[in-house]
Amino acid sequence: MSEFDYDLFVIGGGSGGVRAARMAAQYGAKVVVAEEYLVGGTCVVRGCIPKKLFVYASHFSEEAKIAGHFGWDVGKPSFSWPKLLANKDKEIDRLNKIYIRNLEAAGAEIIQDRAELRGTNEIYLVDQDRTVTAAKILIATGATPFVPHNIPGAAFAVTSNEAFHLEDLPKRVVVVGGGYIAVEFAGIFHGLGLETCLLYRGPQILRGFDDDLRNGLAEAMINKGVDVRTEANVGEIKKMGDEYMVCMHDGREIMTDLVMYATGRVPNTTGLGLENAGVDLDGAGAIKVDQYSRTNIENIHAVGDVTNRVNLTPVAIREGAAFAETEFNNNPVSVDHSDIASAVFSQPELGTVGLTEDQAREQYGEITVFKSVFRPMKLTLTDIDEKMMMKLIVDKASDRVLGCHIMGPDAGEMVQVVGIAIKMNATKADFDRTIALHPSAAEELVTMR
């Protein structure tokens, strides 16, 4: 009989924790998952899934305009925010139940409670006011929205967490931030009919992305009607009755009905009792781990956004699976964090994989850049002047494709497939040998010269 209550205790029921728990249980371990909210984590509950549903909803205002140019008379469209919320909540509830069912089918136990460490093998369940023990502990608590506490009135703002549950949709919104969450929600709000202003303190949105994507998206958002302001520093937010005044450092003021902060996310490590077990954190508050997701404490591991490596849901899932393989199937597996495809569900959409042009120049020196800018075929019958952009970064010495960057419809879908080729070290010659599929936007990837 084991000296511990469980072989594995997972704190956090998100994508990474659930995958690790299911696999460990299937390998014969006695596993429990503690989750204080809904099983499924940020991605399912208040992240990727509801966000993309909102993106779909916001597209239909433009789709209605496009339809008229193709001979359709759709009348004046109307939108119901409560209906969207209700349908979204129904879908999230369905997914939550699937996650629970899959965990239970694998043989894992689920505890709806907050869990905090009391030692290297002891976990305190807050609501139940009891302590359990585990041979191994996996921390998979993800990340949480960051709101600066040094800006007066910042507490008046909502974050992405609350944006999915607004009782009423306002007429005006100010989104503070320039990352992928900020530009996605700016597109959502604008598409749903709100007067939308995006404020970013840096010189251009989407820091870290390829410059052509950054510049192209900013231009497209402005052309659509989003008020994009860069080098805009918020100094204070004042509540003025039912409105809010956003005061800038340069003296400008913006009146709005809603302020949303989307200035990044931070590892969700506060209040977990990590100090009781001696777990090391880095300067950003993330749990420090090695290539096998091991912390400095032998039996405590961490996966996903709480480690602040590559903060994407599929990465957390892969890390959770690698942990289970390593610790419960005697098959050491580490995760390769290079060349991971990602998408920004902005409007227009972005897809990217591999190195940016600047990164490639820095790492490889001489490179060749192939770029194509054109009007999507779907818009050729309309008066919408929006461009699509595709870009390949190629190492001049080896001809290997180092990066691919796409802006336009279905960019994420395309770049997922291109990611396979880049992971296989495909060359530009390999792309050139591939016969184009016509008429398609993706054919540009194999016809660029």
Image: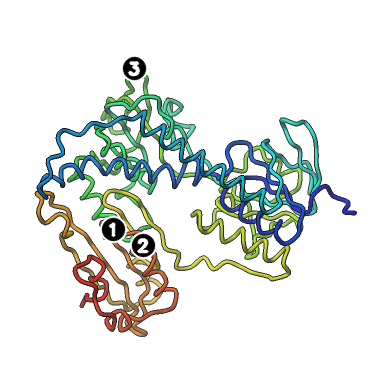
User: Going 37% across and 73% down the picture, which residue do you hit?
Assistant: 402
Q: Secondary structure at mark 3?
A: loop
Q: Secondary structure at mark 1?
A: helix
User: Going 36% across and 43% down the picture, which residue do you hit?
Assistant: 182
Q: Is residue 386 left or right of residue 109?
A: left
Tag 1: Cα neighbours inside 10 Å, few (<14), some, or many (≥20)? many
Which amino acid type is shown beneath numbered disc 1? Leu
Q: Are marks 1 and 3 in contact (CB under 8 Å)?
A: no
* Residue identified by numbered label 1: 213
Q: Secondary structure at mark 2?
A: strand
Considering only order in the chain, which callout, 1 or 2, is on the residue closer to the N terminus?
1
Coloration of the structure image: rainbow
Tag 3: Cα neighbours inside 10 Å, few (<14), some, or many (≥20)? few
Q: Is residue 101 left or right of residue 391?
A: right
* Residue identified by numbered label 2: 352
* Residue identified by numbered label 3: 242
Q: Are marks 2 and 1 in contact (CB under 8 Å)?
A: yes
Residue 337 rendering spot, x and y as whole percentages = 52, 65
